[in-house]
């Protein structure tokens, strides 16, 4: 059974940093793109960042570009999201997901497996 477990969330002050991790088990995802999405209370889920199967290509939402960095370690079946310069508007439940294809995408319908999420709260 496929399982994605996110970790690394927490409470941080504005301007601070966090690094999220997502460990995948149940199969190897080295041939699939991986993505991070988030959902704030009362809002729809939105794309944050995605990385291609090899790590050679990445995509970011405009709102996080220059502040967040997505990376992956295929040997560990793990994807990371390093977040710097956090803002109050970054507060949300962050989910990782496994893509259906190799290329990074910002469309959530192109992701087949989802984790339970890790909460990130940024105090202003």
Image (cartoon, grey):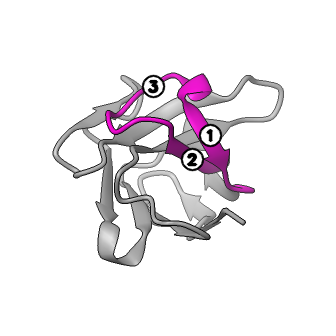
Q: Residue at x 49, y 67 (%)?
A: 21
| Label 2 crowd (10 A; few <14 / some 14-19 / many >=20) | many
Q: Are marks 2 and 1 in contact (CB under 8 Å)?
A: yes
Q: Mark 2 points at which residue?
A: 97
Does 1 sit above or below residue 102?
A: below
* SS class, disc 2: strand
| Label 3 crowd (10 A; few <14 / some 14-19 / many >=20) | many
Residue 17 seen in the current view: no
Q: Earlier in the sequence, mark 2 or mark 1?
A: 2
Q: Do the residues labelled 1 and 3 touch (CB within 8 Å)?
A: no
Q: Name the residue under label 3.
A: 106
Residue 12 seen in the current view: yes
Q: In this view, does 63 lie to the left or right of 56?
A: right
Q: Where does the magenta region start and end?
A: 94-117
Place of residue 106 in the rendered image (x, y in percent of width and height, measured from the top left):
45, 25
Quadrant in which the N terminus is drawn:
bottom right
* SS class, disc 3: loop
Place of residue 114 in the rendered image (x, y in percent of width and height, measured from the top left):
67, 48
* 38, 106: nearer the viewer: 106
């Amino acid at each position: 059974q496929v399982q994605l477990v996110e970790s690394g969330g927490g409470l941080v002050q504005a301007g601070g940093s966090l690094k999220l991790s997502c460990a995948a088990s149940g199969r190897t995802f080295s041939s699939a793109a991986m993505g991070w999405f988030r959902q704030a209370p009362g809002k729809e889920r939105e794309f944050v960042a995605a990385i291609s199967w090899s790590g050679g290509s990445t995509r970011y939402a405009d709102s996080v570009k220059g502040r967040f960095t997505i990376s992956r370690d295929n040997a560990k079946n793990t994807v990371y999201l390093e977040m710097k310069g956090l803002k109050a508007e970054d507060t949300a439940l962050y989910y990782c997901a496994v893509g259906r294809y190799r290329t990074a995408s910002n469309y959530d319908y192109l992701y087949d497996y989802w984790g339970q999420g890790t909460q990130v709260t940024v105090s202003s």
